[in-house]
Image (spheres, coloured by chain):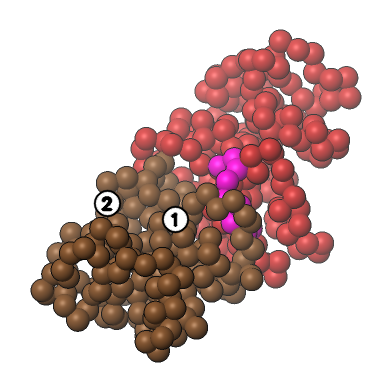
Chain colours: A brown, B red
Amino acid sequence: MVTGHVFIATSLDGFIARENGDIDWLLKHDQAGEDHGYDDFIGDIDVIVMGRGTYEAVRSMGQWFYTRPVLVLSAQLAQQEVPSELKGKVRFLDKSPGKAMAMLASEGARRAYVDGGRIIQSFLELDMISDMVITRVPILLGSGRPLFGADPRDVALAHKGTRSFPSGLVQSHYEVVK
Amino acid sequence: MVTGHVFIATSLDGFIARENGDIDWLLKHDQAGEDHGYDDFIGDIDVIVMGRGTYEAVRSMGQWFYTRPVLVLSAQLAQQEVPSELKGKVRFLDKSPGKAMAMLASEGARRAYVDGGRIIQSFLELDMISDMVITRVPILLGSGRPLFGADPRDVALAHKGTRSFPSGLVQSHYEVVK
């Protein structure tokens, strides 16, 4: 079985990007010398799962910074070839989250990093997220792409710890209570 | 001059109440014996400013727990008498936030507790909030009444400190950067 894990930053009002995808406000707070734990987190991850929105946003940055195999769940992209420079690093797949995770399990993966707002929402609704590390940036954006969506159920969380940084970032770790 | 101060709890996805006003999820996490700092906060407050929604929600709880004079900004309520049991504790006023704060200043108030989602949003948009203490409850509600609204500007914040509690509540203090 593969477990889903979230590691993401949001504005204090819960947005992961502006409406146009811009994360300038986040990069501005990403001070040199502060270790927010991403390397430790990714060190224990076998595979990264994302949707088309996140894939295209990362592609538009011009640099592919993921150091783990990436699976992009997208019916639209699954009809295309993976760009040659990403061959062996990225796969496009037209499968539901459940079937994708079953496929990853059959390949031997244990821990999947689930990245991007809409796919995190889908995985949460399907009870496929084990825990979340959420880093709050001290800014209100007023609008943008929200981290969380309109899940009709309550999702209970267990707080595992919080730390803050000189930059003003506050990072909390929550387990999803099953 | 009167400064505006926020002290409020939200779900991890940013709601201060369910759509119907229910705060059962909050009360469930309000464990006996945990001091979340409300008494210290209110000890330095001269007056409480709220809108009709918050006033009516508190009234419906059947117990008036505010220990400071309350000003309710509402054109609708300002046409009514204050209920006899709240005379001397509550005033209804049909004024803008700016004029209400000027009136409070002329009465000698220095620090106002601004309570309730929509009025906090109005005061933030008008640059009339100095700082906010926001307590995160470890639950996702999926929908409800949001703390923050669609302010068209970025609002920069300075993180002053964060503490967490055995109940899982995480409380952060932010100053609004002018």
Q: Is residue A171 magenta?
A: no
- Could you say whether the residue bearing mark 1 is in a helix, strand or loop? loop
User: Which image quadrant is residue A42 in?
Assistant: bottom left
Question: Which residue is drawn at the image coordinates 53% and 45% (left, top)?
Answer: B131
In this orientation, does residue A27 appear?
no
Within 10 Å of disc 2 (Cα), the crowding (few <14, some 14-19, many 20+) is: some
**Residue hosting label 2:** A22
- Could you say whether the residue bearing mark 2 is in a helix, strand or loop? loop
Q: Is residue B15 left or right of residue A58?
A: right
Q: Is residue A96 left or right of residue A86?
A: right
The chain letter for the residue carrying disc 1 is A
Question: Which residue is drawn at the image coordinates 71% and 66% (left, top)?
Answer: B167
Question: Which residue is drawn at the image coordinates 56% and 42% (left, top)?
Answer: B146
Which span is picked out in magenta? Answer: B133-146
In the picture, which quadrant includes the C terminus of chain A?
bottom right
How many numbered badges does the structure rendering display? 2
User: Which image quadrant is residue A48 in?
Assistant: bottom left
